[in-house]
Amino acid sequence: MKRWLIICALMFGGSFSSVAQTAPKPPADDTAARDVLVSLTKDWIDAEARRDGAALDRLLADDFVGIAPSGDKVTKKMVVPDPKGQGGGLSFTGDDFVARVYGDMGVVTGNGTWKAKEKGTLCFTLAFVKHGERWQIVTVHLSQVPQR
């Protein structure tokens, strides 16, 4: 009888531990976030071409640091000296965007063609961080693609 009680107690206790274990959550569908990041990347390219200081001020995080195609470091203050005035000045088209999301951090890569034809093509990487409900660019790396 004692054996029977011990077996029942173990089975009963074991059933509670299996209820307490939950199945792991499937990975969240980040399609919407990836779409937002690609859209913000296009907004950034457009704001650079239009020299829209206000838009660049919204898109770039206060601690933004980027790398120009020349290899020079640029800060937000260098890109947007006056949020009410002009900023930026890069003029290129973008395509082949690929976005990935890692929680509150996202990365977008892409290719572009300088609007001044003699400059050729470039590739770029943008890193975004989500502050509250808003994504901002924390770094950009632009690389000139060597002509062959």
Image: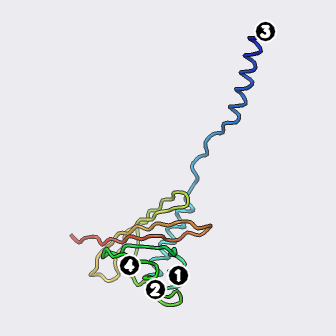
Residue 15, percent from left and from top: 72, 28
Q: Tell me which numbered mark, 3 or 4, is placed earlier along the sequence.
A: 3
Residue 96, percent from left and from top: 40, 66
Q: How many marks?
A: 4
Q: Which of marks 3 and 1 is in front?
A: 3
Tell me the CA gap for discs 3 and 1: 78 Å
Marks 3 and 1 close (CB-CB < 8 Å)? no
Q: Mark 1 points at which residue?
A: 55
Q: Tell me which numbered mark, 2 or 1, is placed earlier along the sequence.
A: 1
Q: Determine whether, in the image, residue 41 is placed left or right of residue 124.
A: right
Q: Name the residue under label 3.
A: 1
Q: Tell me which numbered mark, 1 or 4, is placed earlier along the sequence.
A: 1
- How packed is label 3: few (under 14 Cα within 10 Å), some, or many (20 or more)? few
Q: Name the residue under label 4.
A: 92
- How packed is label 1: few (under 14 Cα within 10 Å), some, or many (20 or more)? many
Q: Which of 145 and 70 is in front in this view?
A: 70
- How packed is label 4: few (under 14 Cα within 10 Å), some, or many (20 or more)? many
Q: Determine whether, in the image, residue 148 is placed left or right of residue 5.
A: left
The kind of secondary structure element at disc 2 is loop
Q: Name the residue under label 2.
A: 87
Instruction: Tell me if residue 99 comes above or below residue 15 in the rendering.
Output: below
